[in-house]
Image: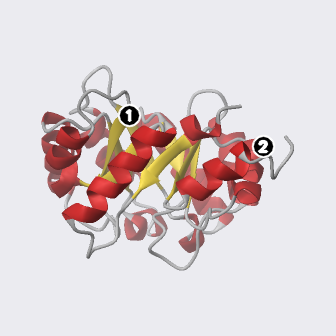
């Protein structure tokens, strides 16, 4: 296992400055992380920093609430891709899901699927901490129906993050059609490995370096 290749090295705090972005990009290159995950404003800057490396760029869209007009989400995704993003992590409209406006939620996701290029990946953040089990299942089903590539547990900006139970449930619903990204509260190697064992194939975390070192130093057996 090369756990570094599971990691989207993440910096999404609202007060992040260029010096923070530079640091995260350097760490991603040095440790071989799969991608750097940033707000869309920073995508062109990240592309410049990662030039010549194989680290990919993930941009969040409609972040962190998801409660924006659909065309705005699609426009943000299209711009991020044009600026160099390889992957998009979008937040669903959580209120619409809870109101059972399922056609709208599916079309909201499809609006971003339509602007993807063949090599781009879409992850749908369902914010599990705000959903009932029935709503989590429905969010996964709608993401699958809309043509997404991943379902993702959390933004990390709400009342809770990823849990093993949610990852297991999400994987059961999407099966082999979609992958699962666990994000929010993953701060050590033990938690990271539990998420992978539960079915996650990608991890969103800002504690990436310490997690990678946890494997390298032999602190955990797997």
Residue positioned 83% across, 50% down in the render: 220
The image shows residue 218 at horizontal and vertical percentages of 80, 46
The residue under label 1 is 55
Q: Nearer the viewer, residue 183 or 144?
A: 183
Residue 181 visible in this rendered orientation of the protein: yes
Residue positioned 27% across, 70% down in the render: 16
Residue positioned most to the right = 221
The image shows residue 126 at horizontal and vertical percentages of 49, 58
The residue under label 2 is 197
Residue positioned 68% across, 61% down in the render: 188
Residue 179 — which label?
Answer: none
Residue 104 visible in this rendered orientation of the protein: no
Q: Nearer the viewer, residue 193 or 179?
A: 193
Instruction: Say which element carries label 1.
Output: loop
Instruction: Say which element carries label 2.
Output: helix
Relative height, residue 11 to residue 167 (above, below): below
Residue positioned most to the top = 118
Foreground: disc 2 or disc 1: 1
């Amino acid at each position: 296992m090369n756990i570094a290749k599971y990691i989207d090295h993440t910096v999404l705090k609202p007060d992040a400055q260029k010096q923070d972005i530079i640091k995260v990009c350097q760490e991603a290159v040095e440790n071989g992380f799969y991608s750097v995950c940033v707000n869309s404003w920073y995508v062109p800057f990240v592309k410049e920093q990662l030039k010549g490396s194989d680290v990919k760029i993930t941009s969040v869209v409609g972040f962190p609430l998801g409660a924006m007009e659909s065309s705005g989400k699609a426009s943000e995704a299209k711009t991020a891709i044009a600026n160099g993003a390889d992957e998009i992590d979008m937040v669903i409209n959580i209120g619409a899901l809870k109101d059972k406006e399922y056609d709208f939620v599916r079309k909201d996701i499809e609006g971003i699927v339509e602007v993807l290029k063949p090599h781009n990946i879409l992850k749908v953040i369902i914010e599990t901490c705000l959903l009932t089990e029935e709503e989590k299942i429905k969010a996964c089903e709608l993401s699958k129906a809309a043509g997404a590539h991943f379902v993702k547990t959390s933004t990390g900006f709400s009342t809770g993050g990823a849990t093993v139970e949610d990852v297991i449930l999400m994987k059961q619903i999407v099966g082999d059609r979609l992958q699962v990204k666990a994000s929010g509260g993953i701060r050590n190697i033990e938690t990271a490995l539990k998420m992978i064992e539960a079915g996650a194939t990608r991890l969103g975390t800002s504690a990436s370096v310490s997690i990678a070192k946890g494997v390298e130093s032999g602190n955990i057996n797997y």
